[in-house]
Image (tube, rainbow, N blue to C red):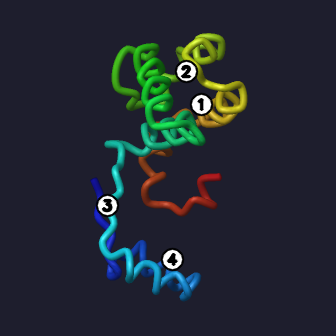
Amino acid sequence: MRYFSTDSPEVKTIVAQDSRLFQFIEIAGEVQLPTKPNPFQSLVSSIVEQQLSIKAASAIYGRVEQLVGGALEKPEQLYRVSDEALRQAGVSKRKIESLALHKKVKTKSRVQKWNIIDNYSIL
């Protein structure tokens, strides 16, 4: 779990881009953000879980983890799973297409760098 306050570097960056947000951030106070243990796991769960209820997202992500034999920690685990198996687990075709783009990331070092480079560079 990560905590963000008004003096967090992340919040300062957002406020620098849009100063109007500061009043809302100040009202909200410290925000807790649940995070996954590694960047690749966060990426896959974000793709799989977007626009779903928490219960449905958890069920589908759980089935994806079963397909890879446990916690999804490395891209190589996802390489071994067919698109059809992901479809049967409940992952939509569009989300499988998004995951397929990320399957192309072949090196662990590239994934480890995701947490230190900005979103535009990753995309």
Local secondary structure at mark 2: helix
The mark that comes first in sequence, 3 or 1, is 3
The mark that comes first in sequence, 2 or 1, is 2
Q: Distance between the Cα atoms at labels 3 and 4? A: 16 Å
The mark that comes first in sequence, 3 or 4, is 4
Q: 61 above or below 53?
A: above
Local secondary structure at mark 1: helix
Q: Assess disc 1: are there few (<14), some (14-19) or many (≥20) residues with their C-alpha within 10 Å of its C-alpha.
A: some
| Residue under pointer 3 | 32
Residue 49 appears at what percent x and percent y? Answer: 52, 37
Amino acid at pointer 4: Ile
Q: 48 above or below 119?
A: above
Q: Distance between the Cα atoms at labels 3 and 1? A: 30 Å
| Residue under pointer 2 | 79
**Residue at 35% in and 80% down:** 6
Is the Cβ of the residue at disc 3 closer than 8 Å to that at disc 1? Answer: no
Is the Cβ of the residue at disc 2 closer than 8 Å to that at disc 1? Answer: yes
**Which mark, by number, is residue 14?**
4
| Residue under pointer 1 | 103
